[in-house]
Image (spheres, grey):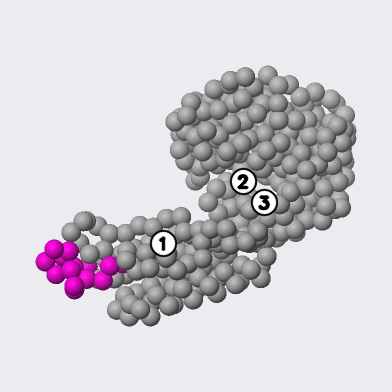
């Protein structure tokens, strides 16, 4: 049976381990040790993603979460207040995705403690999920046999099941104008920031429709207040549940950049649009959904089937032929300093995970 005190202890210990994207070694060592102590065979691929296997009945089921967190995520001080876990307000909590990792660890421990027969399990803990699903993109899928799985990385309660998610294209642009002294000869300069602003004013941004969004999240440029800025950089994205609409957005973005480039023939605009991950749409009657539904039904919970505007490792897993379904992990307000984990909901996630491991 799941142990709430042990769960909270595990979750707080994991949260206190610094693991911003690209710096997951300490988390890797901790979770690998815990998995080995539970009897799983732990290995790593070339990217150092954690791949752990537990012998059992039937085809293996994948249980996945990611090891990294966003910034500010160093020196986190978790605080429990009335069943709610939060940081001290100076950092994120890191519930995304350490609540997911804790759910898998506690779910396995509680399931194995029953001494009942268990399903064959493959645990995949990826690196560098934040900012591009990098670990999943670099996962050695030849080491993974599972064709169905659960990704513990969703916002909300564990019966929130995400059956569709968008494709995402990443947009980067480098703009080169011409520097000049802003006070002595500004007419000789070409402002890269002015060109970038012109581009921004023409791009379709924000909520485009019920399936599509677009954003430029970062603009940088310039050196000093008295120099016409020669360089500027734009970093953004657009995403859609419809690949047809995604392609239309790409045409519109390209058209805007081409139009503005024609207005500044002496400047240079280098635009790159790259797909980061593909959309998916899972049949609610699929066997992978049924596995989750059975575990939740045993807890007296019904599935809440939803679509999301966000991406996760599931996008990559599904593209590679694994029907991997994201579920909630009891966390709210991902990526903020007011992020919270509701202990009761994290416990429900553990109970669901235990049910999946035992095939209940």
- Viewport quadrant of the C terminus: top right
Answer few, some or many: residues within 10 Å of disc 3's Cα (few below 14, many 20 plus, some between 14 and 19): some
Q: Residue at x 65, y 28 (%)?
A: 342
Q: Secondary structure at mark 1?
A: strand
- Viewport quadrant of the N terminus: top right
- Tell me whether circle 3 and circle 1 mark residues in contact (CB < 8 Å): no
- Tell me whether circle 2 and circle 1 mark residues in contact (CB < 8 Å): no
Q: Main secondary structure of the magenta part?
A: loop
Q: Circle 3 sits on which residue?
A: 308
Inter-mark Cα distance, 3 to 2: 21 Å
Q: Residue furthest left?
A: 184
In the displayed structure, 334 sits above or below 252; it is above
The part of the chain drawn in magenta is: 179-192
Q: Secondary structure at mark 2?
A: strand
Locate residue 338, reporting x and y percent: 52, 33
Locate residue 150, reporting x and y percent: 74, 45
Disc marking residue 126: 2
Inter-mark Cα distance, 2 to 1: 28 Å
Q: Circle 1 sits on which residue?
A: 234
Q: Nearer the viewer, residue 266 or 24?
A: 266
- Reading the chain from its start, which is encountered first: label 3 or label 1? 1
Inter-mark Cα distance, 3 to 1: 26 Å
| Res 33 visible | no
**From the viewer's perspective, is 131 left or right of 357?**
left
């Amino acid at each position: 049976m799941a142990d709430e005190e042990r769960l909270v202890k595990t979750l707080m210990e994991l949260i206190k381990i610094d693991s911003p994207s690209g710096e997951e070694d300490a988390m890797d060592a901790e979770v690998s040790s815990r998995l080995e102590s539970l009897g799983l065979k732990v290995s790593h691929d070339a990217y150092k993603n954690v791949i752990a296997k537990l012998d059992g009945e039937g085809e293996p089921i994948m249980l996945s979460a990611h090891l990294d967190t966003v910034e500010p995520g160093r020196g986190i001080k978790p605080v429990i207040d009335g069943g709610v876990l939060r940081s001290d307000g100076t950092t994120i909590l890191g519930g995304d995705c350490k609540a997911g990792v804790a759910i898998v660890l506690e779910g396995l421990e509680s399931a194995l403690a029953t001494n009942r027969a268990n399903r064959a399990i493959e645990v995949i803990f990826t690196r560098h999920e934040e900012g591009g699903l990098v670990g999943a993109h670099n996962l050695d899928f030849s080491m993974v046999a599972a064709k169905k799985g659960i990704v513990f990385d969703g916002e909300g309660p564990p019966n929130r099941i995400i059956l569709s998610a968008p494709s995402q294209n990443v947009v980067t642009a480098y703009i080169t104008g011409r520097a000049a002294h802003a006070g002595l000869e500004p007419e000789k300069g070409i402002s890269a920031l002015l060109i970038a602003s012109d581009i921004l004013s023409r791009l379709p941004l924000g909520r485009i429709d019920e399936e599509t969004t677009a954003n430029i999240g970062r603009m940088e440029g310039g050196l000093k207040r008295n120099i016409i800025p020669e360089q500027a950089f734009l970093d953004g994205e657009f995403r859609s549940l419809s690949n047809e609409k995604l392609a239309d957005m790409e045409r519109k973005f390209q058209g805007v950049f081409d139009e503005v480039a024609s207005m500044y023939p002496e400047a240079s605009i280098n635009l790159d649009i790259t797909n980061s991950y593909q959309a998916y749409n899972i049949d609610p009657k699929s066997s992978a959904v049924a596995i989750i539904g059975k575990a939740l039904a045993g807890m007296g919970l019904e599935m809440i089937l939803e679509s999301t505007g966000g991406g996760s490792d599931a996008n990559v897993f599904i593209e590679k032929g694994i029907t991997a379904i994201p579920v909630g992990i009891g966390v709210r307000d991902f990526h903020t300093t007011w992020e919270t984990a509701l202990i009761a909901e994290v416990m429900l996630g553990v109970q669901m995970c235990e049910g999946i491991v035992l095939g209940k």
